[in-house]
Each structure stands twice: as C-alpha cells, then as structure tokens.
C-alpha cells in the first residue's frame, strides 16, 4: 500500500502546474457549488419571506408616518376652527336673532369651512353644531344624529369629557357589505375664549376613501389584504376588499397583532384560513391605529424556484469555467509576476515613471495596483514637501507684511492723537486713542483668553468710537460684576454682539435707543448679556442662528457675527459654552453668552 501511495504522490507532484490546478480546482469549485445550491434551495424560501416581509413592514411604517401627518392636519384644522374669531362670534349669538342675520352668518361660516377644505384635497366633511341651535356644514346634508345630537352619546360624550381637546371615534357597522361612507370622526367641544362657556361642537367626518388613499402606496402582494384597525380590532379601512369595513376583524392572529407594536409572523392554515400566510403589522404611536398586511406564503415563496433553477445552471457553467480558469491561470499567473519584478528593478535604479498594466482583479492584479499606488504616493510626498517649503517662505513674507501694516496704522493714529492735542481737539484725540487701543488689542499675540476687565476696556473704547459716530442716538449702560473682572474670557467675545446690536438694532430704530451690557456669576458659569431695545430680528432668525442653520442673503447680514461667535464658543468650550438669543420685532434683542468660570489663561479648546 505504501509504495502505491508514494508512487501516486510522485505522480501528482511531478505533474505540470496546469494539470495540478485543473485537478485541484475542479473539486474545490464544483463541490461547494453543489452544497451551496442544496442549502440555498431549502433556505431560500425563508430568506425571501423575511426580506419581503421587512420591505412590507418598512412600507407600512412609511404609510403610518403619512397617516400621523394626516391626523395632525385634522387636529390642527379643528383647532383653527376652535380659535376662529368668526366662529366664536356666530356661535355666541342669540338663537332668536332675525332670519336675515342668520342667513348672513350661514354664508359667513360657509365661506370659512370651504376655505379650510380648499386648503388641501381631503375627502372629509365638517360640521359646526352650536348650543344656540345653529348648524353649519360643508356638505349637502346634515345627518340627523348631528342635527339633534345627544351630548351623552359617542363622539359628543368623548368631546365633552375631553374639555376642548381633540377626540377620535370610529364608526362601526353591522353590515359586512358596508364598504363606503364615514369610517372615522374627529371632534372638539367648542368653548368661548375668555369665559370657557360651551358653544357647541366641531365634528370632522373622514370618508373611507380618504384613508385608503394614504396607504395605497404600500406594497400589496398578489392575493394580499391590508387592514387599518383601531385599538379594539375594528376595521376602519381596508384594501382591496372592503366588505369587512366597520366590523371587528375575526382572525386567529388578531390578538397577537393587538398585543404587539410592530413585526411579522407566520400564520398557519386552520379552519379560518384556507392557506398559510404571513402577517405584517405596524402601530401608529400617535393614534394607536394598526396597519396589518396579510400575504399568502405561497406568493412569497414563488421566487425560490428560480433560485433552484439558477443554482443548477451555475453548477453546470461553473464546471466549464473551472476547467477554463485552471488552464488560463497556469499560463497567465507567471507572466505578470515577471513584469512586476522588472518594474521593481527600474524603481530601484531611480526611475519612478513606470506603471504596472493591471488587466485582472486577482491577487497579482491587486499587487500591481498597490505597486502603482505606492509609486503615486511617493511622488505625491515629494511634491508635497516641495510645496510646503514654498508655502513656508510665502507665509513668512505675509507675516512680515501683516505685522508692518497694523503697526504702521497704529503709529499714524498716534500722530493724529498728538496733532489733535496740539490743536486742543479732545474728541478727535480721544477717538484716535480708542481706535489705537482697539488696533493694538487686535494685533496682540499670545493666548486667546484674557481677563474680563481687559476685554471690557476694549468694549468701552469701541462704544466711545460709536458714540462719536452716532451722537445721542443711543445710551450705553455697562454693569459688570466686580467678582468676574479678574476671571478670564475669550478674546473679542462681546465685541461682535455689541456691534451687531448697534448696527442692526439701534441704528434703524426711530428715536433714541438703549444698550445694556451686563455680566455676572451664575453658579459655575459666567453669563454675559447684551440687550437693546432696537428693531429686533425677523421671526425665526434667532432659532436658526442658535442651531447654526442661518444662511444670510445679500441684504441681510445680521447673523454672520453671531454665527461665528457660536462656532468660537463650540471650538473653545464645547458643550460648556452656550449662546441664547431672544428677539421680538420692534421690541429689541437680548443675546446671552454663557461660558465656564476660567481662573487661568489656559485655553480649553474642543477640537
């Protein structure tokens, strides 16, 4: 036996590389394909079912999201009617008023209801039922149950107990053929604003077709059914079959659906179900309504047969391809290796302008692409070192120029100051001194943190210059707690806020304004506030600036400085720095800046 094994081993090892690859590659390719095909055939149905069910569940979640918006729109509509001044006024009138006035009120309220219906394409009807006997509705007829309603029944009882909040009520039918009409109603108890005296009810009836349009986009499989259930299991709407609308769903999976939130499970065949099916459901967090999709299992597994046929074809083609690949690899695998070796010798001699022609995506091809990427990276590093040397030289030149220009301006301002003193022009002298100090402060090198008293001195210099410009246009009040003057703050923290308040708040105000700057300790925080009584900001702008979502137009640059300040606070203090803006048009703006207590000049950058 042993001689035969030694002979077989010698024969195999003595074969050409082409035959070795052919003998080894065929079993390694065909056997895994056969095993994988059998496994795929038995597991494909389950995989397909799970994938389709997850897709359907995602679609149901999207439809529930759309239904939530629909419900919010209906609730907002009832709130608009509740707060309408015309509705409040008409429902408060004497029921025995003249007929002409009643007709005028009917046209008046009718226009309001039509305007609400015209806002969106809703399949709904609106009813206003007044305690004074007035009845207004958007449709052609007023149901008898609404004309002479019972306040202790159904929707009206719920609305009365809710005390003005919106309530929902489903319509149940004893007829399984009732596939049309009203399926859902929303209502509120209307009260007179100011006295809380009951005025009546507003009722919005939603047609079944209005709800069906919301979930028609859900993926409906052939033979499947979609139900919209309330919390008790009654069918509010369904598609494609509607003969059970208004009745309680009688199915073995109902209890599991009502007790869960979302998911899917298999329902086996029994006396109530002719065929096994998959049940997919999702629950609305706002209304508690459930969307249920029932899909026959046979529909979901029909695609698995194609996987079986495809596997057989892959096995047949794989065997042929395996023989061809064994031959091709034995011939081609050594040729690119010799080419790569030659290119490496050229790189060693200093020639970097070479490239490996990678035709295939095998290991040799990947090695060749890595070789090309390495050469490109080496050349990029050489170019980067050269560019950095040029950038360093250019930066040094610009630094000299940047240092020269501010010092030149400062010396010029100092000359203006002395000339103003010689001619006894105190205002010009004081303005030149303030501007010079601001300039010296802006070009001063060192740590970005400085004592509060130094930063406030620059604010006083800035305000002096602004007072020279605006005269008595505004009055500035500075109230800084002495306890925080020795603490440290970010350089130029308040200057953009003060400049923004003067330029965009007080300058455009009619008459004289007031600017109030304060700072104090609040626990382990230092809080600065810059408040003005100017024209204020447009509605919504403070929230956009605080979120960092402000995008100024060419005419409106109010928030640029505040947005940059927000970024600086985040850079140096992270979550400990906070900017809050409160503004009201024509009443002024208040900007509050909150930073941690800093007793040293060590910057706390959060990058």
Image (tube, rainbow, N blue to C red):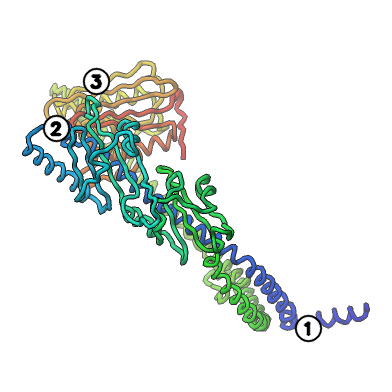
The image quarter containing residue 80 is top left
Q: Is residue 286 left or right of residue 118?
A: right
Numbered marks: total: 3
- As drawn, the label of residue 477 is 3
Q: Going from the N terminus, do you reach mark 3 or mark 2 first?
A: 2
Tell which of 298 and 242 is nearer to you: 242
3 vs 2, front mark: 2
Q: Is residue 441 left or right of residue 535?
A: right
Count residues near mark 3 (Cα–Cα under 10 Å), then give few for <14, some for 14-19, many for 20+.
few
Which residue corresponds to mark 2? 95
Q: Position of residue 22 (x, y in %)?
A: 72, 81
Q: CA distance from mark 3 to mark 2?
A: 60 Å
Q: CA distance from mark 2 to mark 1?
A: 110 Å
Residue 257 position (above or below residue 165): below
In what element is the residue under mark 2?
loop
Q: Going from the N terminus, do you reach mark 1 or mark 3 first?
A: 1
Residue 583 in view of the camera? yes
């Amino acid at each position: 036996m042993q001689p035969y094994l030694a002979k077989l081993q010698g024969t195999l090892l003595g074969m050409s590389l082409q035959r070795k690859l052919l003998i080894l590659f065929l079993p390694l390719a065909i056997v895994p394909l056969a095993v994988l095909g059998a496994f795929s055939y038995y597991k494909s149905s389950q995989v397909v079912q799970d994938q389709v069910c997850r897709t359907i569940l995602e679609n149901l979640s999207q439809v529930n999201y759309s239904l939530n918006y629909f419900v919010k729109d209906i609730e907002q509509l009832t709130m608009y009617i509740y707060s309408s001044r015309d509705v409040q006024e008409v429902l408060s009138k004497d029921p025995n008023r003249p007929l002409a006035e009643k007709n005028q009120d009917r046209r008046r309220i009718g226009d309001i209801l039509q305007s609400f219906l015209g806002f969106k394409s809703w399949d709904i009807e609106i009813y206003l039922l007044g305690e004074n006997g007035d009845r207004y509705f958007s449709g052609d007829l007023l149901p008898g149950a609404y004309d002479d309603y019972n306040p202790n029944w159904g929707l009206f009882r719920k609305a009365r107990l809710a005390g003005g909040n919106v309530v929902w009520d489903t319509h149940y039918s004893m007829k399984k053929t009732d596939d049309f009409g009203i399926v859902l109603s929303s209502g509120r108890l209307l009260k007179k604003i100011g006295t809380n005296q009951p005025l009546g009810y507003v009722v919005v009836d939603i047609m079944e077709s209005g709800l069906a349009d919301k979930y028609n986009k859900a993926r409906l499989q052939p033979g499947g059914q979609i139900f919209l259930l309330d919390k008790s299991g009654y069918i509010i709407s369904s598609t494609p079959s509607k003969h059970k609308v208004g009745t309680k769903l009688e199915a073995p999976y109902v209890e599991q659906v009502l007790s869960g939130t979302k998911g899917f499970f298999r329902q086996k065949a029994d006396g109530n179900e002719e065929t096994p099916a998959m049940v997919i459901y999702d629950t609305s967090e706002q209304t508690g309504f459930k969307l249920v999709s029932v899909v026959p299992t046979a529909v979901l597994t029909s695609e698995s047969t194609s996987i079986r046929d495809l596997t057989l074809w892959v096995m047949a083609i794989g065997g042929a391809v395996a023989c061809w690949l064994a031959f091709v690899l034995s011939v081609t695998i050594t040729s690119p290796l010799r080419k790569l070796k030659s290119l490496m010798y050229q790189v060693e001699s200093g020639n970097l302008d070479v490239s490996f022609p990678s035709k295939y995506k095998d290991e040799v091809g990947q090695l060749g692409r890595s070789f090309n990427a390495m050469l490109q990276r080496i050349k990029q590093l050489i170019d980067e070192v050269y560019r950095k040397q040029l950038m360093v030289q250019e930066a040094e030149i610009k630094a000299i120029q940047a240092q020269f220009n501010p010092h030149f301006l400062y010396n010029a301002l100092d000359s203006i100051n002395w000339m103003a003193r010689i001619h006894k022009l105190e205002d010009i002298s004081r303005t030149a001194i303030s501007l010079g100090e601001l300039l010296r402060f802006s070009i001063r090198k060192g740590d970005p943190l400085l004592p509060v008293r130094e930063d406030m001195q620059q604010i006083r210099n800035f305000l002096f210059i602004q007072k020279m410009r605006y005269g008595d246009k505004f009055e500035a009040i500075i109230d800084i707690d002495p306890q925080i003057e020795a603490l440290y703050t970010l350089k130029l923290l308040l200057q953009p806020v003060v400049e923004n308040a003067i330029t965009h708040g007080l300058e455009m105000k009619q008459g004289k304004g007031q600017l109030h700057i304060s700072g104090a300790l609040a626990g382990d925080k230092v809080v600065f506030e810059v408040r003005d009584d100017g024209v204020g900001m447009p509605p919504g702008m403070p929230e956009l600036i605080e979120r960092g979502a402000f995008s100024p137009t060419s005419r409106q640059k109010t928030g640029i400085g505040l947005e940059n300040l927000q970024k600086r606070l985040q850079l140096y203090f992270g979550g400990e720095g906070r900017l809050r803006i409160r503004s009201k048009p024509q009443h002024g703006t208040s900007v509050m800046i909150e930073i941690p207590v800093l007793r040293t000049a060590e910057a706390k950058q959060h990058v």
